[in-house]
Amino acid sequence: MMLEVKLRKAETAITDQGMIAAAKSQHYEYKFKAMTQEAKAAINKANEDAKAKLDAAHLQFE
């Protein structure tokens, strides 16, 4: 009887740990996607700024 109780508690703990691990994994996946979007936005802005400076330089030399 005591062994069954311990086994049930262990199964519950294992299930809980699995759900926690899945939630953490999902959380970090969302963070990674958001970070990637932020990085893409930063790169696009840097490209636009560089292009604007290049265009301005071309206008000065014409």
Image (spheres, grey):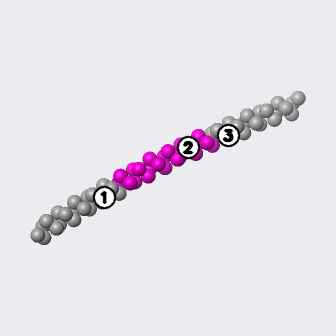
Residue 51 place in picture, x, y as percent: 25, 62
Question: How far is disc 2 from disc 1 in space, using C-alphas?
Answer: 30 Å
Kind of residue sitting beneath label 2: Gln
Q: Earlier in the sequence, mark 2 or mark 1?
A: 2
- In the rendered view, does 1 fall on the left or right side of 47? right
Report if residue 32 lies within the magenta region: yes
Helix, strand or loop status at disc 2: helix
Residue 38 place in picture, x, y as percent: 39, 50
Which residue: 13% across, 65% down?
59
- Residue placed furthest toward the right: 1
- In the rendered view, does 37 fall on the left or right side of 46? right
- Is the residue marked by circle 2 packed among few (<14), some (14-19), or many (20+) residues within 10 Å? few
Residue 6 found in image quarter:
top right
Give the magenta range. 21-42
The residue pinned by badge 3 equals 17
Helix, strand or loop status at disc 1: helix
The residue pinned by badge 2 equals 26
- In the rendered view, does 45 fall on the left or right side of 31? left
The residue pinned by badge 1 equals 46
Which residue: 67% across, 40% down?
17
Residue 11 place in picture, x, y as percent: 76, 36
- Residue placed furthest toward the bottom: 61
Q: Earlier in the sequence, mark 2 or mark 3?
A: 3
Kind of residue sitting beneath label 3: Gln
Helix, strand or loop status at disc 3: helix
Q: Main secondary structure of the magenta part?
A: helix
Foreground: 49 or 6?
49
